[in-house]
Amino acid sequence: MHLSGRFLPWVAAIAAITLVAGLFWGFFLTPDDYRQGSTVKIIYLHVPTALMAINGWFMMLVASLIWLIRRHHVSALVAKAAAPVGMTMTLIALATGAIWGEPMWGTWWAWDPRLTSFLILFLFYLGYQALWHAIDDPDTAADLTSVLCIVGSVFALLSRYAVLFWNQGLHQGASLSLDSQQHVDNVFWVPLVICMCGFGLAFLALVLVRTRTEIRSRRLQALLLRERMA
Amino acid sequence: MIAVLTRDLKLAIRSGGGFGLGLAFFLLIAVLTPLAVGAQSDLHARMAPGILWLGALLSCLLSLDRIFALDYEDGSLELLATSPVPMEGLVAMKSLAHWIVTGLPLTLLAPVLGIILALPAEGYFWLVVSLALGTPALSLIGAFGAALTVGLKRGGLLLSLLVLPLYVPTLIFGAEAVRAGTSGQPATTALMFLAAISAGSAALLPFASAYALRINLR
């Protein structure tokens, strides 16, 4: 709590700086694509949020495992705090993708494997949060949501490959993987990486704030209980 | 464990309700969809695999909360938990009972509904095989969802929100197998995936469900 309190303003500040710098660079200082025009610039929102949407779930999975194995209370709260942030990232990725897809593919939505699996990921986030809200006892809720998160991860991964089997896609392949021979030009690559760092840090800052809020509300409840006992 | 199985089967059949209700719901979906999308039978023929799989999914969902809820309310779940039978075996037997009561009759009824949906003749075999391979996974995944929500007062809606995303892979492979089989393409890959999901769920999910049940009984 003490440590996170000291780190939080720094993380938030660096996140803000990198986000502003990356987005400004991406939006105003990069050339337009010769075929897609300026619509290509939505990539600076779309790719980082999509990245964080998946990493957010992964973070919840790790936190859930830590909770189930080590019973560390903060990790359960981190998992709880990460869920709404990750869900928002998923929504932003879906929305920016739709906005880009309308002029480029001529459609807001297509039942493409990537799009479909993101929608399914959104549903998983939804169910996870609904379970947190439905259970009153915090420890029971933490236990049950952790189990759901683990089982859900397996099925989310399974769904990802099942939809590949189900339909061939419209979405382009990954153009940023580290090992591929061919990827986007450095003019686009550098601001994109800055944006990804910015969104990563912003995610971290939001999760920290939310976790601290959760911890405080737990303490408050404990205090109230003690008052009532006395 | 066998005693648990026979007890659940007897309860399901004698108490009425759950047993026939799922089947009636399945029938209703197969009747209502053509009314909703229009009377062209070529359209029905193309949609039949999807409709039948979706119907199986939803009518399975309908009876999920009965797996543990009744036993939880009258306290017999706690008695079962203290019995020498391991909780995992208990969950597996309850899933099996649920499958015998819902999945198996659904599989047997599906070809009849295929007729009213104008499913082409090549499709029937694949429909029955895919449902037979896939519905065990539906019961097992559903038992997991029921175990998570057993302590909740109004868990029904939440249960469907939790379970339906988990049903996605089963639905995709199941409907895909029937579609491929109907149009004469090889369907074995999808069937193998379907069987793998069922087998994997049978092996692993009872542990997760039993863990969730223990938490809820704490």
Image (cartoon, coloured by chain):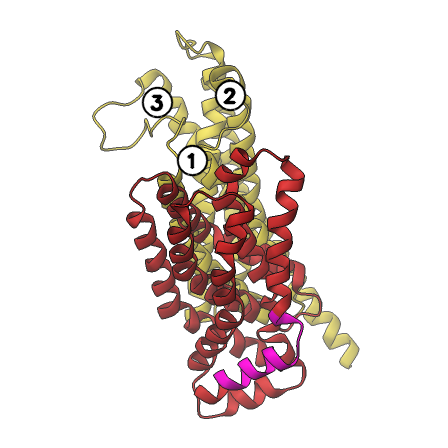
At label 1, counting other C-alpha atoms closer than 10 Å, the crowd grade (few under 14, some 14-19, many 20 or more) is many
Secondary structure beneath disc 3? helix
Depth check, front residue: A69 or B117: B117
Q: Are marks 3 and 2 in contact (CB under 8 Å)?
A: no
State which mark lies toward you, 2 or 1.
Answer: 1
The picture places residue B10, in percent across and down from the top left corner, at: 57, 83
Check chain identity for marks 1 and 3: say if they share one: yes
Q: Quadrant of the C terminus of chain A?
A: bottom right
The picture places residue A94, in percent across and down from the top left corner, at: 53, 33
The correct choice, above or below, for A226 with respect to A164 in the image is below
Check chain identity for marks 2 and 1: say if they share one: yes
What letter labels the chain drawn in red?
B
The correct choice, above or below, for A22 with respect to A88 in the image is above
**Magenta-colored span:** B5-19
Q: In this figure, which residue is indicated by the disc labeled 3?
A: A189
Check chain identity for marks 3 and 2: say if they share one: yes
Q: Quadrant of residue A160?
A: top left
